[in-house]
Image (spheres, rainbow, N blue to C red):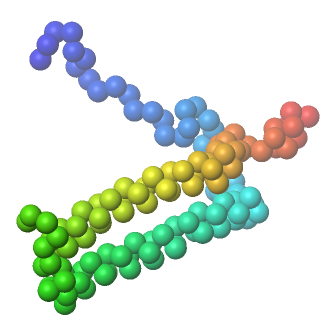
Amino acid sequence: MAPDSPTKDPTPPDGNGGGDAPITDEAFVAMHGDPRFADLKRRLYRFVFPMSIAFMAWYLLYVLMSAFGRDVMGTVLFGSVNVALVFGILQFVSTFGIAILYTRYANRNFDSLATELREELQNGSPNEKQEGGR
């Protein structure tokens, strides 16, 4: 061991948002009933479910074609590249494409609301702070 390296691991973060008070069960229940939270879940599901179904259908097509469409999958396109290889590479491309689409969708449609709700959950709503300060 080098003489200047630490002998013990650094202390991990406390896990509750960097010094915020612990979140109570009542706060979780209240947030779950908040219409903004329901809207956030709806926005998320509007992307996740259709995209998941589309990707699974695309993957299932690949698997079924590999199992039952060997003649088509074995068709040489050029050199030693066949349809099966192109399908396989497109599986990776579509996975990365979905990840990029999701990132853009999340940034545009719900990251700001999710941040607002998380901060409210961790720090209490502005109304609670005003009532507590009276």
Answer yes or no: is residue 67 visible.
no
Which quadrant holds residue 124? top right
Taking the spot 20% from the left edge, 73% from the top edge, the residue there is 83
Note whether residue 105 is visible. Answer: yes
- Residue 80: horizontal and vertical position, in percent? 8, 65
Considering only vertical position in the picture, is 74 above or below 104? below
* Residue name at image x 48 percent, y 35 percent: 14
Looking at the image, residue 30 lies above or below residue 63: above
Residue at position x 17%, y 70% from top? Answer: 77
Residue 25 lies, with reference to residue 72, above or below; the image says above
Q: In the rendered image of this protein, does residue 129 appear above or below residue 55?
A: above
Q: Quadrant of the C terminus?
A: top right
Residue at 69%, 40% in the rendered image = 123
Q: Assign the N terminus to one quadrant of the image.
A: top left
Q: In terms of image quadrants, where is residue 70? A: bottom left
Q: Residue furthest front?
A: 78
Q: Position of residue 51 (x, y in %)?
A: 48, 69
Label tally: 0
Which residue is more in the foreground, 46 or 75?
Answer: 75
